Amino acid sequence: MTPSVDIDQLRRRVAGDLLRIKAVTLSPEAPFTWASGLKAPIYCDNRLTMGYPAVRRVLTDGFVARLDEHGLAPEVIVGTATAGIPHAAWLAHRLDLPMAYVRSKPKAHGRGNQIEGPLASGQRVVIVEDLVSTGMSSMKVVEAARVQAGAEVLALLAIFTYGLAGVSDRFAEAGIPFYTLTDFDTLAAVAFEQNTLSEDDRCSLKAWQQDPQAWSEARQG
């Protein structure tokens, strides 16, 4: 059991860390182009957290705190390939629990596994993600754990979410509690307080969050 953690302080601490190490970059005036082709004022690469031991400890502590907060007692920690794998490993090590991970699709050779590591029917699992955007890839992992392994998915944990419309509903419809260490709104608030984000930029970020497609289309060409 970890000491009691103030969840609001945790959100702000993690947001500040992600900004400091540039795991999340905000650029409303010079948008990034995502793999989907959409332009966005934010880019998240939580793989950078692997290079910062102090940040990793905060993230692992945060995951433990969220499990304790909701009384979750998993038997196996399941990571999402690939960026969720190290965080699942650190959490499993901290809790002295087995770990498995789920690929985005089955291997095209060998045994054709999609789930790697021991995972038995009926076992209680928590899935660890680095980032939730639309939630679609996360739900594929949930379904693989449920259908292929017969596991009981207690919740999905993630470092960060963009907070896009419909994502929480998607998890709710699937009966999966969804908890993050920080989120888009907290990150924007912290960046504004640090004077690295203007009020106009903050409004632009909010407009993107509310309608990414329209925001992107207005900046094409």
Image (spheres, rainbow, N blue to C red):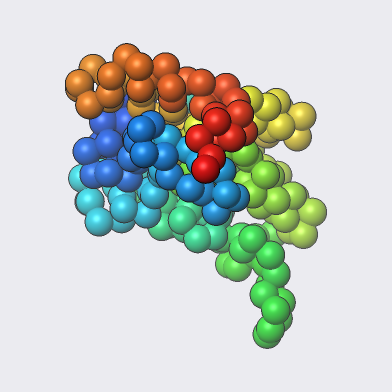
Q: Is residue 105 left or right of residue 3?
A: right
Residue 64 % position (x, y) = 41, 37
Residue 136, by quadrant, is top right
Q: Quadrant of residue 193?
A: top left
Between 215 and 86, the residue placed more toward the observer is 215
Q: Is residue 20 visible?
A: yes
Residue 93: percent from the left, percent from the top? 39, 55
Question: Residue 107 vs residue 189: left or right?
Answer: right
Residue drawn at x 58%, y 67% as measured from the top left: 117
Residue in the picture at 62% in, 63% down: 103
- Check the image and name the residue furthest to the front: 221
Task: Residue 219: give x, y in percent of width and height.
Answer: 50, 35
User: Observer-nearest residue: 171 or 93?
Assistant: 171
Q: Is residue 209 above or below residue 160?
A: above
Q: Of residues 99 and 39, which is closer to you in this image?
A: 39
Q: Residue furthest right?
A: 147
Quadrant in which the N terminus appears: top left
Can residue 75 be seen here? The reply is no
In the rendered image, the vertical position of residue 102 relative to residue 13, given as above or below: below
221 sits left or right of 16 in the view? right
Q: Spot the residue most to the bottom.
A: 110
Q: Nearer the viewer, residue 131 or 176?
A: 131
Percent across and percent down for residue 4 are: 33, 22
Q: Residue at x 43, y 22 (%)?
A: 204
At 75% from the left and 34% from the top, the residue drawn is 174
Q: Is residue 139 above or below residue 172?
A: below
Give the number of callouts.
0
